[in-house]
Image (tube, helix red, strand yellow):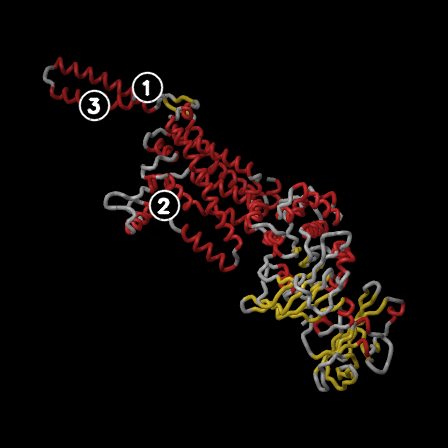
Amino acid sequence: MAPDDVEGRDMPGLGGEHGADGDPMRGKDVRLDKVSIRFGEATAVHPTDLSIHAGEFFSILGPSGCGKTTILRTISGFIHPTEGRVLIGGEDMAGKEPNERPTALIFQNLALFPLMSVAENVAFGLEARGIGKAERLKRAQELLELVALGGFGDKKPADLSGGQRQRVAIARALAVEPSVLLLDEPLSALDLKLRQHMRTELRAIQRRVGITFIYITHDQGEALAMSDRVAVMSRGRLEQVAEADMLYADPATPFVATFVGEQNVLRGRVATLAGGEAGVDTPVGRLQGRTSGTLSVGDEALVMVRPERIALAGTGENSFPARLVSRSLEGPSVNLDCAAADQQFMVTLPNGPAIRELPEELSLSFGRQDALVFPVGALANG
Amino acid sequence: MGSLARAYGKPLATLIALITVIWILALILVPLGAMVQQSLWWRDAKGSVSLTIDRLYNDIAVLELDQGNATDPAKKAAIEAQLAAKQAEVTELEAQEKNPPKTYGFANFTRMSSLHFYIFVRTIIYALMVTLLALVVCYPVAYVVALASGPRKAVILMVCLIVPYAINELLRVYAWLMILDYRGVINGILGWLGIVDLDNRGWIPFLENPSAVFLAMIYTYVLFMVFPMVNTLETLDRNQIEAARDLGASTVRIHRRVIIPHAKPGIAVGCIMTFMLSAGSYSVPSIMTRGQGGDWFSQLVYRQFYESNNWNMGSAYAVSLLVVCTIFILIMMRLFGVGLRDIAK
């Protein structure tokens, strides 16, 4: 194994902590080194550097067609990068076929073998390695117990429910003792309730086996709920790699800001710049917000505020009058649809008695720490 | 019928039922019944009635000539008496010839000569070999076609499979005849290379070997093997192949454990079709062997009908072949664990 020359960013201990008890499964780190992937003229992935730590639950989040599945298939070996290298555990994967890599892939449709029993499915990887029948069925049984399907070995995949099939697919992938488990939107076919349940389940399984999980999804809820870190992708480029909390609180680009969670977006022109803050002239007046850099006075800019950061009271800075158009009850919270200077505003407030008696004319306000100012760029919703 | 009437209304339902009945009658019951019925009876030919009649007519003609030439009245009377007797005999025999007594039984089946039975068994074995060879040839083709996609697939399908089959079956067989003939394409090339001496009849007699028939037959029936397999292979989720590969399975194992089990119904249908077509093929063996490579059973059936003029025997032969083919279908379905429903898919 080549010495790991990535700056001391990997998190020692995560793998060891959870994959203890002499479990042979150990997470390995995955590194993309200037990987780009082109199909003929079309570029699926622009040159990308990415470092995924050993034993980490890492998600790649992005809209369909952003190149996230291409990256996953490149790591698994079904696609070879046009340029750049894929390293797993420090080892260059160039020229290695999927079966020679320490990875296992869980397909979006799971791709269970419908004509084999559940136990045979799970044991298939061991069968391919020439392990005897008794031994591999015993191992399959252990894995089925790990995913709480102990009594289902003799059933056919078609006899199981969606969530059970899901777990069979996980057991089948774990059977080959991969260091990295790659999951290609495996929950997308499940209904909402089951999906939420499986999130917890997946996270728990990952902790139990301690290997690296790389999870592809277009569902931000899944990515935020399960992952240690999340990469947001758009149009073949990584927009941001960060912990889930940071992604929400401190988006690096307008795309991430609008793709993860809701945003109110206002266009304007930068009027003042001082100490990491910008004042932007917008249709509702001058608004103050945080900014991270590249703007200069006179540039066009976007001001973004999350709906739950807007308050109904207040005057002075970052406040403006608005008209209440409609409201919809979410249960614990209420969404107000407001309009100010031909601009639509979404305001989310905790539900309570005061909400029922709102006047039609409101005053909206937010703190300058709650607003983000970006240069004009691509947004998630067009 | 009740649900049909509810769905389409009475008149239309009646029409559909009627068409179904006509279909079953015209395509299945009547021809099959006629064949089976024909095979179950024969007419006892006492001596050869037709030959006797022919002889009697000869005699009558001679007697009539004599009668014309005779001058002696006594002799003339004697000839007339003879004539009358012969006429009466002819009338009686002709009645017998027109309507000989039918006898029912299985004699048509048991009367098969040992040579014919040998040809029968050999034909079945040959047909099995053709089926097996066609399967071996067609599986990779079907796999490639089924997994190809987009314009590539259309090209493969058109150029390799559809275009050859736009040509009449007989012409395709004749094409192979031309290739394999004594002075055909292959012998011509070999002669040009100096390997065989065509001038002194030193050619390689490809056509005298049963494999020439096999070759032409596989070529002729390839489509019937390929298409059912393509159809089932197309429904295979490619992720399953990738999943198996990702789990470390070798190509052979992927085929054995994932692809072939999935393709089973298609393989069964392809084998059944190819077997039935080759076991019953008349044109291919008769064109390819030209009587030099041994008959196939279908040629015997043809002879019973059109050369021996013994339709009863011919029917019995045909029914025997049908029974064997049916047994083959059942064995294949059992062997591949597919039901009629899978095949219908």
In front: label 2 or label 1: 2
Left or right: where does residue A262 sit relative to residue A73? right
- Which residue lies under the disc numbered 2? B173
Q: Tell me the quarter of the picture where residue A108 sits.
A: bottom right
Q: Amino acid at mark 2?
A: Val
- Which residue lies under the disc numbered 3? B58
State which tag comes first along the sequence, 2 or 1: 1
Q: Tell me the quarter of the picture where residue B91 sits.
A: top left
Q: Which mark is residue B46?
A: 1
Q: Amino acid at mark 1?
A: Lys
Which residue: 73% across, 63% down? A223
Q: Is residue A326 above or below residue B145?
A: below
Disc 3: host chain: B
Which residue: 60% across, 50% down? B249
Q: Is residue B305 above or below residue A2?
A: above
Looking at the rendered structure, the secondary structure element under dot 1 is loop
